[in-house]
Image (spheres, helix red, strand yellow):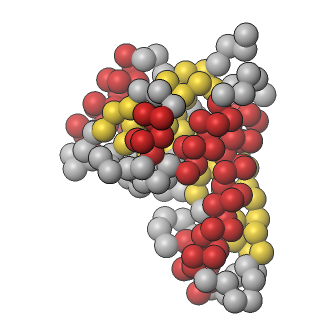
């Protein structure tokens, strides 16, 4: 049996990247096992996935960042989690939290970093008349969307592209490169 790294996924929304990681984590030789899902949104659809797949989940309000991080760390330590994936997690973690997991937190971002850090990436890519956009999996660092890049996937922006069509096109690639990135980290 492959010894899998105990991992946690932080979510805020639909959980489509969470779903792609869960499906791949069921593979015998995939390097991580999701032992916990933490959400800062009580209505996150990803919490339903946790229930469906029998993965423990916790909701902590992020209204008070310090309390959210303290509660999250308590659960993570209790379960001996060694690796964290941010998958559609829409809050910024503190430098102190990130340092506790040095190079053991990764994130996926819907642009070709370092371009279009932060929010509204698709709108900004279209407004800039970029020929390409894409997605990036990177290590989380204290500076927003600035950690070391693990993997990127480029997509062509077509002539009549809309924010929604670009979002859908990039999401397909996100679901491929997030699991690939996890494999490459532990290879």
Residue 45 at what x, y percent from top left?
Answer: 42, 49
Seen as rendered, the residue at the extreme front is 52
Locate the N terminus by quadrant: top right
Question: Relative to residue 16, is residue 98 depicted above or below?
Answer: above
Task: Tell me if 75 is positioned left or right of 154 in this view.
Answer: left
Residue 103 at what x, y percent from top left?
Answer: 58, 34
Locate the C terminus by quadrant: top right
Residue at image point 76% right, 36% down: 184
Residue at image point 46% right, 16% down: 80
Seen as rendered, the residue at the extreme top is 1
Residue 141 at what x, y percent from top left?
Answer: 52, 45
The quadrant in which residue 111 appears is bottom right
Residue at image point 49% right, 73% down: 120
Res. 139 in view: no
The quadrant in which residue 127 appears is bottom right
Question: Relative to residue 78, is residue 146 depicted above or below?
Answer: below
Tell which of 69 and 25 is nearer to you. Answer: 25
Q: How many marks?
A: 0
Task: Tell me if 140 is positioned left or right of 89 in this view.
Answer: right
Res. 128 in view: yes
Task: Tell me if 12 is positioned left or right of 154 in this view.
Answer: left
Residue 57 at what x, y percent from top left?
Answer: 38, 32
Residue at image point 69% right, 41% down: 179
């Amino acid at each position: 049996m492959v010894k899998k790294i105990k991992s946690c996924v932080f979510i805020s929304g639909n959980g489509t990247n969470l779903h792609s990681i869960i499906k791949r984590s069921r593979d015998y030789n995939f390097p991580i096992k999701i032992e916990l899902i933490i959400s800062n949104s009580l209505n996150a659809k990803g919490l339903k996935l946790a229930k469906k797949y029998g993965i423990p989940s916790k909701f902590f309000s992020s209204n008070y960042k310090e309390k959210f991080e303290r509660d999250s760390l308590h659960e993570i330590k209790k379960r001996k989690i060694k690796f964290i994936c941010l998958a559609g997690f829409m809050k910024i973690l503190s430098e102190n939290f990130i340092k506790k997991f040095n190079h053991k937190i990764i994130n996926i971002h819907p642009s070709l970093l370092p371009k279009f850090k932060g929010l509204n990436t698709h709108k900004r890519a279209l407004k800039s008349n970029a020929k390409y956009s894409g997605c990036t999996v990177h290590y989380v660092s204290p500076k927003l969307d600035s950690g070391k890049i693990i993997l990127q996937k480029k997509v062509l922006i077509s002539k009549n592209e809309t924010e929604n069509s670009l979002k859908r096109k990039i999401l397909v690639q996100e679901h491929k490169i997030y699991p690939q990135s996890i494999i490459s980290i532990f290879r």
